[in-house]
Image (tube, helix red, strand yellow):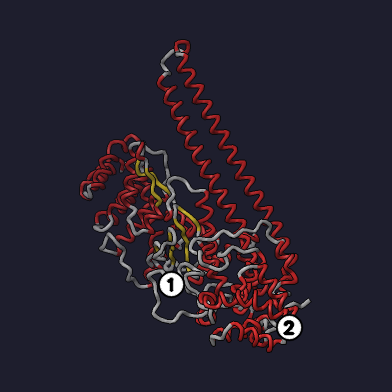
């Protein structure tokens, strides 16, 4: 039954029919703010429905109308009702589990220390009070283990319950979405019962920064929430106006039934009252005019007078003729947008309307879909929200997914930089991706304060030189290694690739690692990463006099040849390293290797040459051919080399470690 009449051409629901060529594709626009919304939309749909990017793009291409105006608003409501509630419960349980784990470790350490202090005492001489203490500590450890297990069980239970709710919700949406959307012209009145049953226990959690957004304040039932959200996405402002006038679901349904009973279109009645309020007409005149225009009987006029006029008149001054942020989005709908009153980022031009924004950015999807999904693009790490961004949707999606996985498995030595770059490198390796490594950003914010400012928008782009080297699989794989540079209590490791990306020389770290090897303070026996690190470092030194930063103005042909030159350098270093290992016996090495490392540390080329040549002279009869090769290597790469001779010298030592 059609309970709501059409309100003229301007108020008709527009049924958009598009040719296949006009079907909007889900892709980035080049504007980081809107692209963040697109990525957030993608993440939200995957979180709720389990669709990865490929499936979402396929569904959008097949029927973008149902995705944007049906699946999305329901997903948004489910996420902020059920999933965020689950997150809060999960956070509390994990926090408690972490405390139990720490307390268990404390008791284990206390027990270990106490037992260590008593290890030299015969068991029969241990005092009863000591035995009681040992038993008490063991009991506490078992108690915390039980609480940890309980927390694990609760986490598992929460995950199972949420997954079950997702499955039920998704199945119901798939079953009912077409029928629900077909009733949009009727304000979804005929499918209200279906909408009411889609999310049981519906209770929206207000996201940070959305305190004044009408969807959340005041609280609403799912039917009114969906109607408002759908109307917002469709830009049906007359429906939003009606919802805001009547405030709640009960009044809305009652008013629509009232209009149906008197055979009057609800927006015609609203328009008439608004126009007369604008002209400052008295209440009695407004009621009489409505009665005359719509042929109302006395009972209907009385109902209009006592109930509906009062509701509309009360809200008219607040709503006025415009709908503020619904028409021209501001910080109410997204905390990072224009703020006309509260904060310091006041604009000096008239705010853009939804149509102007969508037209200016050539968007093929509703702007409010992006504004509401914005937060879902970020992930929480070290008390801040982070997002990796490059102007390609598939790459940003894939790399952020990798970052999310690595955060969940991160170790003590992992940093945000390492997690981000290792995800970028994984993308290069796994998918053979060829993308610009010079146009990447890490966007982060801690919270949304009154200044509405992002904490940091960090440029992750790297120089053309570094980018050209990183895309070389062999070099990148070799540098993608951790090496130990300190041992003992102050044990320290460095990721060679990280230091290279940061434009830091790798030579000092390889030198420190070599010293550990000489002193038998590390079990690492790796060679290839060290030699490639030296080769890359040597090449960079050879093309710049500024040892702090890498000079960027190189000819493109020289850059393209960089990978080949580094590989050739590695080849010579590797051969020299192997030949040194072949020529010098282990007994002879112990005599001069520590002295050689000292000359390299002190940058004393002459001392290095004196020591190595003397050692070679003693070995020349054993293998004259190999000795000759090493002599040539020394002459070409050390004697005649003032720029990076230490790199080539250290390569020889690596073969002797």
Looking at the figure, which quarter contains the C terminus? top left
308 lies left or right of 637: right
416 lies left or right of 312: left
- Place of residue 602 in the rendered image (x, y in percent of width and height, measured from the top left): 22, 47
Specify whether residue 599 is in view.
yes
Q: CA distance from mark 1 to mark 2?
A: 47 Å
Q: Residue at x 59, y 73 (%)?
A: 244
In the rendered view, tell whether residue 355 sits above or below residue 558. below
Q: Quadrant of residue 260?
A: bottom right
| Depth check, front residue: 483 or 267 | 267
> How many numbered badges does the structure rendering display?
2
Say what secondary structure mark 2 lies in: loop
Q: Nearer the viewer, mark 1 or mark 2?
A: 2
In the rendered view, tell whether residue 601 sits above or below residue 276. above
| Nearer-N-terminus badge (1/2) | 2
Say what secondary structure mark 1 lies in: loop
- Place of residue 31 in the rendered image (x, y in percent of width and height, measured from the top left): 47, 74
- Place of residue 188 in the rendered image (x, y in percent of width and height, measured from the top left): 71, 72
In the rendered view, tell whether residue 388 sits above or below residue 163. below
Q: How crowded is the residue under tag 2: few (<14 C-alpha within 10 Å), some, or many (20+)?
A: few
Q: Which residue is mark 2?
A: 297
In the rendered view, tell whether residue 83 sits above or below residue 557. above
* Mark 1 in CB contact with mark 2 (< 8 angstroms): no
- Place of residue 328 in the rendered image (x, y in percent of width and height, measured from the top left): 50, 77
Tag shown at residue 12: none
Specify whether residue 444 is in view.
no
Looking at the figure, which quarter contains the N terminus? bottom right
Q: Residue at x 40, y 46 (%)?
A: 483
Q: Which residue is mark 1?
A: 339
């Amino acid at each position: 039954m059609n309970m709501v009449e059409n309100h003229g051409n301007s108020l008709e629901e527009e049924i958009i029919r598009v040719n296949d060529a006009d079907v909007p594709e889900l892709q980035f626009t080049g504007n980081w703010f809107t692209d963040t919304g697109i990525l957030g939309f993608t993440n939200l749909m995957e979180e709720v429905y389990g669709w990865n990017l490929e499936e979402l793009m396929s569904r959008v291409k097949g029927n973008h109308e149902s995705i944007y105006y049906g699946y999305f608003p329901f997903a948004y409501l489910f996420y902020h009702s059920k999933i965020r509630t689950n997150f809060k419960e999960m956070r509390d349980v994990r926090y408690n589990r972490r405390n139990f784990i720490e307390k268990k470790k404390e008791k284990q350490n206390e027990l270990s220390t106490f037992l260590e202090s008593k290890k030299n005492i015969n068991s029969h001489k241990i005092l009863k009070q000591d035995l009681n203490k040992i038993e008490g500590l063991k009991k506490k450890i078992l108690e915390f283990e039980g609480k940890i297990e309980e927390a694990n069980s609760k986490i598992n239970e929460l995950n199972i319950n949420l997954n079950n709710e997702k499955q039920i919700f998704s199945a119901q949406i798939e079953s009912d979405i077409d029928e629900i959307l077909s009733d949009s012209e009727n304000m979804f009145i005929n499918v209200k019962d279906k909408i009411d049953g889609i999310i049981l226990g519906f209770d929206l959690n207000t996201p940070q920064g959305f305190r004044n957004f009408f969807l959340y304040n005041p609280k609403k039932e799912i039917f009114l929430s969906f109607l408002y959200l759908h109307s917002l996405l469709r830009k049906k402002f007359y429906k939003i106006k009606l919802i805001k006038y009547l405030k709640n679901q009960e009044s809305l349904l009652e008013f629509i039934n009232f209009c149906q009973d008197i055979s009057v279109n609800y927006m015609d009645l609203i328009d008439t009252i608004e126009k007369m309020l604008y002209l400052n007409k008295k209440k009695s005149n407004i009621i009489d005019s409505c009665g005359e225009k719509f042929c109302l009987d006395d009972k209907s006029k009385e109902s209009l007078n006592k109930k509906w006029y009062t509701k509309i008149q009360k809200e008219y001054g607040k709503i006025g003729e415009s709908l503020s942020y619904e028409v021209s989005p501001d910080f109410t709908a997204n905390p990072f947008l224009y703020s006309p009153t509260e904060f310091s980022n006041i604009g000096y031009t008239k705010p853009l309307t939804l149509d102007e924004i969508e037209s200016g950015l050539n968007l093929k999807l509703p702007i409010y879909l992006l504004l509401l999904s914005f937060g879902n693009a970020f992930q929480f790490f070290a008390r801040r929200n982070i997002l990796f961004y490059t102007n390609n949707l598939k790459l940003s999606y894939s790399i952020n997914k990798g970052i999310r996985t690595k955060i969940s498995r991160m170790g003590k030595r992992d940093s945000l930089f390492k997690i981000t770059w290792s995800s970028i490198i994984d993308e290069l390796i796994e998918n053979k991706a060829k993308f610009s490594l010079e146009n990447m950003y890490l966007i982060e914010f801690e919270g949304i304060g009154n200044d509405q400012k992002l904490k940091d928008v960090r440029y992750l782009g790297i120089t053309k030189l570094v980018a050209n080297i990183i895309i070389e699989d062999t070099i990148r794989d070799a540098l993608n290694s951790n090496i130990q540079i300190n041992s003992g209590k102050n044990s320290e490791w460095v990721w060679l690739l990280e230091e290279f990306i940061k434009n830091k020389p790798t030579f000092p770290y390889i030198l420190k690692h070599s010293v550990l090897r000489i002193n038998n303070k590390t079990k690492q026996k790796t060679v290839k990463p060290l030699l490639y690190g030296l080769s890359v470092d040597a090449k960079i030194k050879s093309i710049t006099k500024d040892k702090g930063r890498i000079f960027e103005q190189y000819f493109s042909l020289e850059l393209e040849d960089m990978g080949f030159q580094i590989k050739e350098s590695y080849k010579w270093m590797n051969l020299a390293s192997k030949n040194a290992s072949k020529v010098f016996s282990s007994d002879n090495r112990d005599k001069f290797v520590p002295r050689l490392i000292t000359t390299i540390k002190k940058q004393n080329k002459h001392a290095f040459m004196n020591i190595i040549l003397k050692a070679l002279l003693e070995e020349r009869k054993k293998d004259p051919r190999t000795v000759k090769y090493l002599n040539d290597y020394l002459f070409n790469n050390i004697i005649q080399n003032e720029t990076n001779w230490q790199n080539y010298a250290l390569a020889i030592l690596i073969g002797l470690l």
